[in-house]
Amino acid sequence: MSEAIILQRDLAQEGQTQGPESLPFHLSLLCRGRLTAEKIGALSSSHQRAHSNYDLASHWIRTGRLSERLYFHAAAQRLGVPYLEEAELEALHDVSPDQPLDALETINCRIMKPRVTPNDLALLPESYLVCAPQGEALDLLEAQLKANPALRQRIRLTSPSLFLSTRRDLLSDQALRTNVYRLRQEMPQLSSHHPARARHILYFLFGVGMVLAGSLWSAPLAVLFNLLSVFIFVSISSLRLLAWLRRRTVETMRRSEFEALLKTAQPDQSWPSYSLLVPLYREAAVVTELVAALSRIDYPADKLTIMLLVEADDEETRAALTALDPPPLFSIVTIPVDGPRTKPKALNYALSFVSSELVAVYDAEDRPHPLQLREAALRMQKEGASIGCLQGRLAIDNLKSGFFSQQFAVEYAALFDGLLPFLSAEKLPVPLGGTSNHFPTAVLREVGAWDPFNVTEDADLGMRLTRLGYHIGILQTDTWEEAPVQYGAWLKQRTRWFKGWMQTWLVHMREPRRLWQEMGPLRFLAFQVLIGGMLVSALIHPVYFITFALAAVSLLLHSGTDATFYWLLMSLNSFNLFLGYGSMMLLAHSATAKRYGFGWRHVLSMPLYWLAMTPAAWRALFQLIFDPHRWEKTEHGVDKRPPLSLRD
């Protein structure tokens, strides 16, 4: 039985004896049973040599080895002051001067007054000094009370995590007003808060409809449309082909850099502070696995804070977390119901309270590699101020559940093991994935953080980082995710992605000349291919086959001496099909063979998967007109996944 567990058992017993005078007050509380003053002193000295930000007791509390409530309840008893539970703390109103939101973790004492009634704005005249001190601050409080016993009438003690949670809730309006919508307030030209005007999109749809109808009745117009489609597809295919040709070189370079990077870490390495933001909405089914997965992260607990973001009206998820009772390393941040109910809004709200040097985003179903934070921290230190974000590699672990989960796995392997590493190596724009994004906190705030009105905030933020001069790198470590199994769930998710990519393209193309100047010609063209080309190809994919067929019919009808042009057109289309499907299949096969052991059989069905994207793309376009900020949530925990222990 560990020392901390023995202490926790003894703290719960009544008739506790006071700790030895030889130890500071905050350590004397730990002296119980076999935990003598000498042993506690030795443990504390060893802990201090580990360059921890926290004292021994706080470290045990954060890592779940000691009950925070029992420890501070015992401190209150020893000090002779009342201990405030959650309901009692919520009945008080803070009357201290305002403090920066991101400095709340450093504040351990506030002046608070009781309300006349729990929901009344009127306050009673008496005030209390509500304290949640740790370590030496707790020692200082004990000394002050010894010197001035009358202070006990005004002092109230509570736990640091409860104190911090209550303070966050009290300052929610300030966070909403100053941080959540900061991009719209400071850089409105880069925000999606003003959707495209419906009449403009309707004009666009009318024009597209006329072109499609004309293509069916006019062979020249069909040929023109076909040539335009070929140009778009060839642009995308060329990028994929280059990624495939460079894949082994890039992968070898990244692997050697990763191995060298880990060797640079020293036993007494000073690690930067880290905050993990995990948005949750209707995720009660997966919170147990989530907490288990994040608890496996190998990073100094005293430098890590995990913030679970729960919507104010999501009682089911909150109840599941309360029943789970994770250690204070995890904190629940309540997201107010205000404005669009989107993931980026929740992230911006939580970012208001982040005081760490680095910050990362994970999703509810994520299973990150235990070393991912260490890799990211070392990469940040090595690359310096030029790095804006590091993207973890995403992979799928329920790939055997059906056609869509299997194709999702193939698509992710081609993207995160092939295309994105190539784009990063060539310093081209990288559309981020929605999870396993690691940022320097200062850089994230500088660029305006996430756009709460964009439903694929990740891709938008990647483009914004690039145009503002930052580089995006790809990590070597993986994060395993759950793919949609049913077509309906896949369709809703893909609709949201397409709609967000449309928002991203429209926002960044508001001022094309400025975008060209900020990105440079090569990155500007890559942006058009990656975002614009991908959207157009999804919208017109089936139509391309129709115009291809019409060109073939025209060839049969003009099989005489004037058929040369149509033979050239057919040859061009055949080459386009070969290059388009071939480049993606080559990239996907090389990536999936290494990651999943897939053969060609698994990638040959990709054309059917691509055709399934067209309904999602058109559905996204209509939502962009009539419901631009709607977030269609992906349900998690619906499929059986491998046990957590089977993943690195």
Image: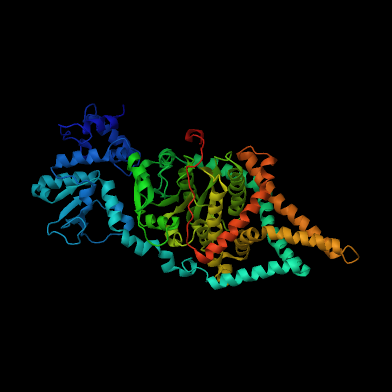
Q: Could you tell me if residue 501 is visible in this image?
A: no
Above or below, comparing residue 643 to residue 186 in the picture: above
Task: Tell me residue 638's x, y (percent).
Answer: 49, 42
Residue 469 vs residue 316: left or right? right
Task: Tell me residue 115's x, y (percent).
Answer: 17, 57
**Total number of numbered labels?**
0
Task: Tell me residue 434's x, y (percent).
Answer: 50, 52
Residue 45 vs residue 509: left or right? left
User: Coloring scheme of the render?
Assistant: rainbow
* Quarter containing the N terminus: top left
Q: Looking at the image, which residue sits at the far left?
A: 150
- Between 410 and 415, the one nearer to me in the picture: 410
Q: Quadrant of residue 326?
A: top left
Above or below, comparing residue 551 to residue 4 in the picture: below
Q: Looking at the image, which residue sits at the far right?
A: 561
Task: Tell me residue 214's x, y (percent).
Answer: 72, 69
Q: Could you tell me if residue 60 is visible in this image?
A: yes
- Between 194 and 331, the one nearer to me in the picture: 194
- Between 531 and 512, the one nearer to me in the picture: 531
- Between 64 and 26, the one nearer to me in the picture: 64
Residue 549 vs residue 53: left or right? right
Residue plotted at (17% across, 48% down): 156
